[in-house]
Amino acid sequence: MSGVRVLVGTRKGAFILTSDGKREKWNVSGPHFAGWEIYHAKGSTVDPNRVYVSQTSGWFGQVIQRSDDGGKTWFQPGTPPGEETGPGGTPKGESNKFVYDVSSETGKPLTTHQFYDGTQHPWEFKRVWHLEPSLTEPNTVFAGVEDAALFKSKDGGKTWSELSGLRGHGTGPKWQPGAGGMCLHTVILDPSDPKRIYIAISAAGAFRTDDGGATWKPINKGLHSLYIPDPAAEVGHCVHHVAMNPKRPGVLFMQKHWDVMRSDNAGDSWTEVSGNLPTDFGFVIDVHAHQPETIYVVPIKSDSEHFVPDGKLRVYRSKTGGNEWEELTKGLPQQNCYVNVLRDAMAVDSLDDCGVYFGTSGGQVYASSNGGDTWNAIVRDLPGVLSVEVQTLK
């Protein structure tokens, strides 16, 4: 029978939840890397036992961890055995360096971006927000980082090189941090075209490459952001997340700072599909595995009040690709609930009855084995959840 592995990144460690295809009983493993912020954990589709984790700390820096046995054991790729720890046994933050391209050929002009106060500020690496393993190569993985840039490893995370064509597109000096920093948080690989990659940055917008990362173009036409000088600018939009059904790679859905958006032409243009949502602010968006017109969001009250409206945790589902939304509440708390659901904290499995999963800032992970009709908490009382990813195991 098929099984499911749910990878949960939290503010104080990673947790691995496993179940068989019925998805009724769950085993919980963790915390892995206890006390560290785990911004993202994701497994390879080529080799399901290959799992990458972004482990970060304001004290000790950034570490990439890798497992080749589904999370049972871990190691730091690129760090010599026996040198994984520093004084006191703490993992070395200098492991797995992410160094911005400053070469005279490609990196020389990539020096500054716009800061909160409008002045120019040098790029400074802080953490890895998102890891995206290749769809075809088990040793290839991409990393979206803060300050916003895209890195690639061809050796399983041992070494990383920047795809500097993104920052060198020409608009880099106009990129500005959002409230959570200037993070590249979304990386989507097109299964029909190995050279096409989509990324999204807070607060610069969405971009696409059609040549494997050498050159990039902003794909923000149709986005409007009232809080920037030019509401329809080429860049500067605070995109919170982008989702795609891999069976229909030309259609994208976006949760923007305000507005849920849709593109039917690979991001060349966007239209708003917020429809009857109670609020069009939110962070997370995802697409049903088998029904590409079925999408899910979790509305949040506002950009200053990061919790669900009216103290009710509601997932909203559209079966028409947007505009018409229904609230899904069965099994979710409908009073005195004031949690948030962050941008990478929802995922879907690919079993016949599509499972939908999301984690909250209150430490709950909710699951639905019937496309969202009913929900139950498969684990409670974890640290605040930063990310949720799902592997469907054969």
Image (cartoon, rainbow, N blue to C red):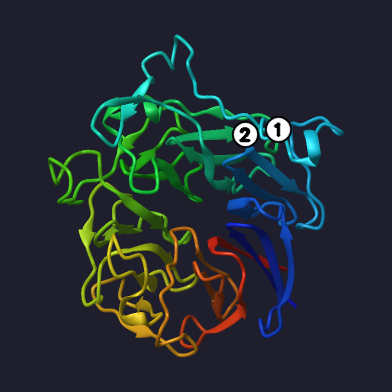
Label 1 is placed on what type of residue?
Lys
Position of the N terminus, as image quadrant, is bottom right
Residue at position x 30%, y 37% from top? Answer: 176
Q: Where is residue 190 in the image (x, y as percent from the top left)?
A: 47, 49
Considering every residue shown, the one lying at the far bottom of the view is 330
Q: How far apart are marks 2 and 1 (CA)?
A: 7 Å
Numbered mark located on residue 158 in the image = 1
* Sequence-first disc among 2 and 1: 2
**Residue shown at the point (20%, 51%) measured from the top left:** 223
Secondary element at image label 1 = loop
Query: What residue is rendered at 31% in x and 70% in y?
Result: 321
Characterize the local packing of mark 2: few (<14), some (14-19) or many (20 or more) Cα atoms within 10 angstroms: some
Image position, residue 288 (x, y; %): 46, 71
Q: Is residue 370 left or right of residue 140?
A: left
Q: Say whether marks 2 and 1 touch (CB < 8 Å).
A: yes
* Amino acid beneath label 2: Ser
In the image, 260 versus 312, the foreground residue is 312
Residue identifier under label 2: 153
Disc 1 crowd rating (10 Å Cα; few below 14, some 14-19, many 20+) is: some
Which residue of the protein is positioned furthest toward the front in this rendering?
88
